[in-house]
C-alpha cells in the first residue's frame, strides 16, 4: 500500500517494479468488492498479488471511470489522484473541479463518489473504478442549472469563482444528507470548504433558498429555471 | 465596420437613482452560470495540445551557498522534457522567495514534473536564516538588506514632528493611552495560485499568454523581455481569474521562467505555482510593530499622537501610513523604519498598510475613551470631521445593538467565564479613476457588444461592463455581451487601489452614451426628433412624450444600420468621484478560561457614489469584513527561526476563516450618499473589522489584544497579564 503523492513530500524515485511506490495494491478490506472491476486492458501492466483477491497495478494503466454518468477511458498511474485524472488525463479535460491546496484542506476539489462528497485530491483514480463519480459539471450546465447552482447565482454566492465548484458539490451533498439542516448545521456541513473572497454569507443564503424551494415543491431536487439576467 | 463621426450633443451622466432601470439594483452576475457549473476557464484550466507542465524546485531555507546541482537523474526520468537551472553552482540563495528557485522541470504530465523536481540533487551549505526582525537587528547579524550600498538591515527611517514638544503635551493631557502592537505577516491566499500558460507558437501574429493577472493591459509590455519579442506581438488573455487582492500585477519570476521554457522548447508551458510556492514567493501584507501613544483633553479631543514603528516587509520596505490615520490630531511625532529580513517582499494587498495603521489607532483610541469614561462612538465623532463618518457610526451602532449594551463607557466582566462586548472602527479610501477605454458595438441584427481589456477579480466587473450599456440603451443585461480579459481589447487599468470601477465604468458609460447619440442621429429622418430627443426604455426607443407611432423596437432601430457600428468610450472625469467612507462594528463573545473568541455579529456600512450592482456590492462588503475577521483571529505566517523553514506553507497551518467562523453579517450600502458618480470601494471594507473585534474584546472584559491574531494562545497571554 502506498499513499498519494502530492506536493511537499519528497521521496526517492525508484524505477517501476511490482512493489515500488508506483504500484498500488488493490483489494484489501472493504475495497475487495471493487477489485473485479479492475479489468486488464491492452498495454496495462497488471499483476495479481498473492494475497487473497488483491490486484496490483503498476505503471501507466488504462482504466474506466464513470464520471457524470459517462464511462470514460483514462490512462492513469497508481498514484494518480482522481483530481489529476479529471483535470489532466481526460480528453476533453474536466477542469471544473479545482486544485487549490492539494492536501485535503480547502475543499475546492470536492466531488461526489457513490453519493458521498470526497476530496478528489486525496482520492486515487484507481480507487474509483466501478463507482459513480459526479463533478460540478454533472450537476448542471449554464443552460440547465441545478437548483443549487441557480440559487448561488440568485444570491451571489460566488465572486472570483475558484472555490465555487467545490461549494456547489458540497452544498448538494449537504442538502441531500440533511435536507432540513439549520443554519448552524449548514455551516458545519460546509466547513470542509474555504473561500477567500468572502462569499460565505451568500452561500448560506443560497442553501437556505434551496431548502425553502424544495420544501415548497416537495421534491428532492428540481432543475433550475432558464436564466434571466438583469435583476429586474 | 464604421466608426461614427457625428458630433456629440450632450455629456453622459449617471442620472437620478430613481430613474434607473438596471443599475443600483441586484444584478445576477453574467458569468455566474459558467462559474457555478465549472465551465468558466481559468489560467489553471488551460489545456493546449502538446503542452508541458512545469514545476519549480525551491531551496527550503532562506539562505544558502549552492555547491552543486545534479540534474542527471532527473533528465533520465520518463516524461521529463526540459530542465532549467536557475541557481548555478557558486551562486547564493539570499532570501526565501523567488530567490529560492533552484530549477524548473517541464514534463509531459504534472506528476512527471514533480518526479523530476524530486530527482534533482542539490548540494548546498545553508547559512543563518535571518527570518525574524530580532535576528535582523542583532549587532552581528548578516546583512540581508541587498539594496545597493546598504550597510544595515534597518533602513528607510522617516521621522516627523518634534518629540520634545509632543512630550510636553502628553504631560499636560487629561488622558493618555498607549499600545504596543505586534502584527504578523499576512498572505493574500488567492485560491488560484500565480501562474501562466505561455503558448510560443505564433498565431495571427501573436504569442499568447494566459495569465492569472489583475493587470491584463499592462502584461504584454512586462513579457517583452522574457519572450524577447515586441509587446505588439504578445496577447494576454485572462478569461477568468481566481483572486488577486493586490498580488498579481506582473509576470513574476514564474512568468519569466514559463516564457523562457516555452521559447526554448517551442511548446506551450503551463506553470502555476504550487500552494507552498505561493506561500513562499507570491508576496504578502507586511507585518508591523508599533508603539503608539495618544493624548486627549477632558472633552475627548485628541491633542497629540506619537508613533514608533517598524515595518516588516521582508525584502520589501513594508507599508504603514502611520498615525493618526483617519483621525484629526494637530500634534504628531513619529519614527518609522523598515527592518529587512531574508524573506519574500511584501506586495500590495487590499488597502496596503491601512489595516495595520488602523489597528494601532483604533486600539489606542478606546484606551483613551475608557480612561475618560467616554463612549467609543462619541470620542470617534469628536475627532472625525466628516459628517458622513458620524452618520455611519450611528448606523452601525444602531444595527449592532449598542443602545441596549450594558457597558458603554467601561469594560464589562466575565460571568461564568463568558463575556460579551461590542467594538467599532472606521474606514476611508481614495479610489482612483484614470484613463480607460471601452468599445461599444451594435450590429444590424440587434446584438450589442461592450468590450474593454479589464479583468474581473471576482468583483463583478464583467457584469457592469454589460449592465451600464443596457441601462443607457434601455435593454436588459442579457441583451449585451461583455468582452473582457484580453489585452487586444481597448486598454484598461491595473486593478490596484480600487481604481477599476472608477476608471472603467465612466469609459463604458461614455461609449454607451456615444452609441445612443449615434443611433439617435440615424433616427432623426425616421422619427423626426433631433439627437437628445428620445427615451430608451424596455427595449424600445420613443420620441420624448411621443406616442406609439413615434416609437421603434430595438430590433427595428438596429435594422437601420447597414453594418456594425462601433464607438470608443473614454474615461470621463465628470462620471467619477473618489472619496469614500465606511464604519464597522463587531460583537464578540470571549471565554476567559479557554481564550476562545467567537464573533457573534459584524456590521458594515459603506458609501461609494452610485451602486452599480447592489448585490455584488454587498458581496464586496461581506468580503472585506470576512478577510478582516480572518486577519484578526487566524492568520499568521510562521517561520522556524532556528533553521528558516516556512512552517505555514499550506492551508492546514496557515488558517483562513471558514464557514464555522462566520458570524451574523449585515452589509449596509450608505444610501444617504446621493452622488451621481462612481468609484471602487473594496479596499475600505477590509480596514476596520479586526480593529472592531479587538475593541469588542476589550469592551467585554478589559483585555487589550495587541498581538495579532487573537488566537486562544495570544488571548490567554493577554488575560494572564491582566488577571
Image: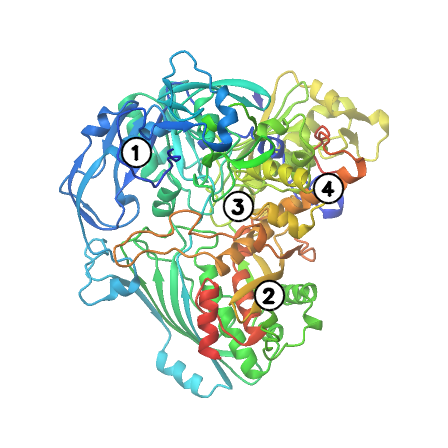
Q: Residue at x 72, y 38 (%)?
A: A231
* Lower position in the chain sequence, tag 1 or tag 2: 1
Note whether residue B610 is visible: no
Q: On the rendered structure, is B342 left or right of B538?
A: left
Distance of label 1 from label 3 (alpha carbons):
30 Å
- The secondary structure type at the circle numbered 2 is strand
Query: What residue sits 35% from the left and 82% below the top?
Result: B164
Left or right relative to B646: residue B190? right
Give the percent coordinates (x, y) of residue B473: 70, 32
Q: Is residue B545 shown left or right of residue B240?
A: right
State whether discs 1 and 2 lie on one chain: yes
Q: Are marks 4 and 3 on the same chain?
A: yes
Task: Give whichever of B565, B468 is nearer the camera.
Answer: B468
**Residue that carries the numbered disc 4 in the rendered image:** A211
What label sits on residue A30 in the rendered view? Answer: none
**Circle 1 is placed at which residue position?**
B257
Residue B281: give x, y in percent of width and height: 34, 45
- Camera-side residue of B577 and A49: A49
Report the residue marked by disc 2: B588
Q: Which residue is mark 3?
A: A194
Task: Kindly report the distance in space between the C-alpha atoms of the residues bearing marks 4 and 1.
Answer: 49 Å
- Label 3 vs label 2: CA separation? 22 Å
Amino acid at each position: 500500500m502506498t499513499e498519494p503523492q502530492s506536493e511537499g513530500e519528497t521521496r526517492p524515485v525508484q524505477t517501476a517494479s511490482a512493489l515500488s511506490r508506483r504500484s498500488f495494491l488493490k483489494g484489501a478490506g472493504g475495497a475487495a468488492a471493487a477489485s473485479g472491476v479492475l479489468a486488464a486492458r491492452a498495454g496495462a501492466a497488471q499483476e495479481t498479488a498473492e494475497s487473497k483477491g488483491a490486484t496490483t497495478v503498476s505503471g501507466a494503466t488504462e482504466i474506466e471511470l464513470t464520471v457524470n454518468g459517462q464511462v470514460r477511458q483514462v490512462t492513469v498511474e497508481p498514484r494518480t489522484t482522481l483530481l489529476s485524472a479529471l483535470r489532466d488525463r481526460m480528453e476533453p479535460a474536466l477542469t471544473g473541479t479545482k486544485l487549490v491546496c492539494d492536501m485535503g484542506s480547502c475543499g475546492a476539489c470536492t466531488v461526489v463518489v457513490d453519493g458521498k462528497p470526497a476530496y478528489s485530491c486525496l482520492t486515487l483514480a484507481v480507487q474509483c473504478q466501478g463507482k459513480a463519480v459526479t463533478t460540478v459539471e454533472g450537476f448542471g450546465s449554464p443552460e440547465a442549472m441545478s437548483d443549487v447552482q441557480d440559487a448561488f447565482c440568485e444570491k451571489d454566492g460566488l465572486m472570483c469563482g475558484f472555490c465555487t465548484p467545490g461549494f456547489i458539490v458540497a452544498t448538494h451533498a449537504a442538502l441531500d444528507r440533511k435536507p432540513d439542516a439549520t443554519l448552524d448545521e449548514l455551516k458545519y456541513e460546509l466547513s470542509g470548504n474555504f473561500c477567500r473572497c468572502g462569499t460565505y454569507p451568500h452561500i448560506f443564503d443560497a442553501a437556505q433558498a434551496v431548502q425553502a424551494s424544495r420544501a415548497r415543491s416537495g421534491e428532492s431536487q428540481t432543475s433550475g429555471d432558464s436564466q434571466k439576467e438583469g435583476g429586474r | 465596420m464604421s466608426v461614427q463621426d457625428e458630433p456629440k450633443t450632450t455629456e453622459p451622466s449617471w442620472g437620478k437613482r430613481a430613474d434607473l432601470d438596471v443599475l443600483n439594483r441586484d444584478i445576477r452576475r453574467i458569468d455566474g452560470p459558467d462559474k457555478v457549473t465549472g465551465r468558466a476557464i481559468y489560467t489553471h484550466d488551460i489545456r493546449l495540445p502538446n503542452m508541458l507542465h512545469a514545476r519549480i524546485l525551491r531551496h527550503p531555507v532562506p539562505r544558502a551557498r549552492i555547491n552543486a546541482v545534479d540534474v542527471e537523474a532527473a533528465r533520465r526520468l520518463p516524461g521529463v522534457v526540459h530542465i532549467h537551472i536557475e541557481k548555478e553552482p557558486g551562486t547564493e540563495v539570499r532570501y526565501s522567495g523567488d530567490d529560492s528557485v533552484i530549477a524548473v522541470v517541464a514534463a509531459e504530465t504534472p506528476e512527471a514534473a514533480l518526479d523530476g523536481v524530486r530527482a534533482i540533487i542539490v548540494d548546498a551549505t545553508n547559512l543563518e536564516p535571518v527570518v525574524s526582525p530580532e535576528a535582523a537587528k542583532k549587532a552581528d547579524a548578516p546583512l540581508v538588506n541587498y539594496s545597493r550600498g546598504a550597510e544595515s538591515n534597518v533602513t528607510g527611517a522617516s521621522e516627523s514632528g518634534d518629540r520634545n514638544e509632543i512630550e510636553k503635551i502628553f504631560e499636560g493631557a487629561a488622558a493618555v493611552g498607549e499600545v504596543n502592537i505586534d502584527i504578523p505577516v499576512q498572505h493574500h491566499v488567492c485560491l488560484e495560485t500565480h501562474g501562466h500558460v505561455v503558448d510560443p507558437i505564433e498565431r495571427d501574429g501573436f504569442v499568447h499568454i494566459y495569465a492569472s493577472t489583475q493587470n491584463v493591459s499592462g502584461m504584454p509590455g512586462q513579457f517583452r523581455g522574457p519572450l524577447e519579442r515586441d509587446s505588439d506581438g504578445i496577447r494576454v488573455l485572462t478569461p477568468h481569474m481566481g483572486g488577486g487582492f493586490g498580488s498579481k500585477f506582473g509576470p513574476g519570476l514564474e512568468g519569466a521562467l514559463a516564457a523562457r521554457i516555452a521559447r526554448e522548447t517551442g511548446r506551450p508551458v503551463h506553470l502555476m505555482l504550487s500552494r507552498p510556492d505561493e506561500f513562499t514567493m507570491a508576496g504578502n501584507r507586511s507585518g508591523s510593530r508599533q508603539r503608539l501613544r495618544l493624548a486627549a483633553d477632558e472633552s475627548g479631543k485628541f491633542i497629540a499622537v506619537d508613533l514608533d514603528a517598524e515595518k516588516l516587509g521582508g525584502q520589501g520596505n513594508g507599508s504603514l501610513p502611520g498615525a493618526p490615520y483617519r483621525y484629526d490630531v494637530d500634534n504628531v511625532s513619529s519614527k518609522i523604519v523598515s527592518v529587512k529580513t531574508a524573506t519574500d517582499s511584501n506586495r500590495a494587498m487590499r488597502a496596503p498598510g491601512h489595516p495595520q495603521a488602523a489597528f494601532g489607532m483604533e486600539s489606542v483610541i478606546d484606551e483613551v475613551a475608557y480612561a475618560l469614561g467616554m463612549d467609543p462612538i462619541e470620542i470617534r465623532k469628536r475627532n472625525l470631521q466628516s459628517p458622513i463618518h458620524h452618520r455611519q457610526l450611528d448606523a452601525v451602532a444602531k444595527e449592532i445593538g449598542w443602545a441596549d449594551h450594558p457597558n458603554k463607557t467601561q469594560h464589562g466582566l466575565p460571568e461564568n467565564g463568558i463575556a460579551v462586548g461590542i467594538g467599532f472602527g472606521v474606514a476611508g479610501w481614495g479610489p482612483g479613476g484614470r484613463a480607460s477605454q471601452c468599445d461599444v458595438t451594435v450590429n444590424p441584427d440587434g446584438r450589442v457588444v461592450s468590450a474593454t481589456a479589464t479583468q474581473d477579480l471576482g468583483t463583478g466587473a464583467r457584469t457592469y461592463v454589460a449592465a451600464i450599456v443596457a441601462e443607457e440603451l434601455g435593454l436588459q443585461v442579457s441583451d449585451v455581451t461583455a468582452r473582457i480579459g484580453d489585452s487586444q481589447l481597448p486598454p484598461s487599468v491595473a486593478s490596484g487601489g480600487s481604481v477599476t470601477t472608477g476608471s472603467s465604468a465612466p469609459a463604458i458609460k461614455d461609449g454607451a452614451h456615444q452609441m445612443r447619440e449615434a443611433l439617435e442621429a440615424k433616427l432623426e429622418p425616421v422619427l423626426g426628433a433631433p439627437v437628445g430627443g428620445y427615451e430608451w426604455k424596455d427595449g424600445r426607443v420613443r420620441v420624448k412624450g411621443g406616442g406609439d407611432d413615434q416609437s421603434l423596437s430595438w430590433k427595428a432601430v438596429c435594422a437601420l444600420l447597414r453594418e456594425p457600428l462601433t464607438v470608443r468610450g473614454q474615461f470621463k472625469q465628470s462620471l467619477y468621484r473618489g472619496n469614500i467612507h465606511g464604519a464597522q462594528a463587531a460583537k464578540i463573545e470571549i471565554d476567559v478560561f479557554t481564550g476562545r473568541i467567537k464573533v457573534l455579529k459584524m456590521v458594515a456600512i459603506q458609501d461609494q457614489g452610485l451602486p452599480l450592482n447592489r448585490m455584488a456590492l454587498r458581496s464586496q462588503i461581506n468580503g472585506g469584513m470576512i478577510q478582516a475577521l480572518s486577519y484578526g483571529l487566524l492568520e499568521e505566517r510562521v517561520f522556524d527561526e532556528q533553521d528558516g523553514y516556512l512552517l505555514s506553507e499550506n492551508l492546514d497551518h496557515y488558517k483562513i476563516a471558514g464557514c464555522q467562523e462566520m458570524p451574523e453579517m449585515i452589509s449596509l450600502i450608505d444610501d444617504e450618499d446621493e452622488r451621481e458618480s462612481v468609484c471602487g470601494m473594496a479596499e475600505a471594507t477590509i480596514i476596520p473589522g479586526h480593529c472592531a473585534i479587538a475593541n469588542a474584546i476589550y469592551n467585554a472584559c478589559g483585555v487589550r489584544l495587541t498581538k495579532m491574531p487573537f488566537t486562544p494562545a495570544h488571548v490567554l497571554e493577554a488575560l494572564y497579564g491582566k488577571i
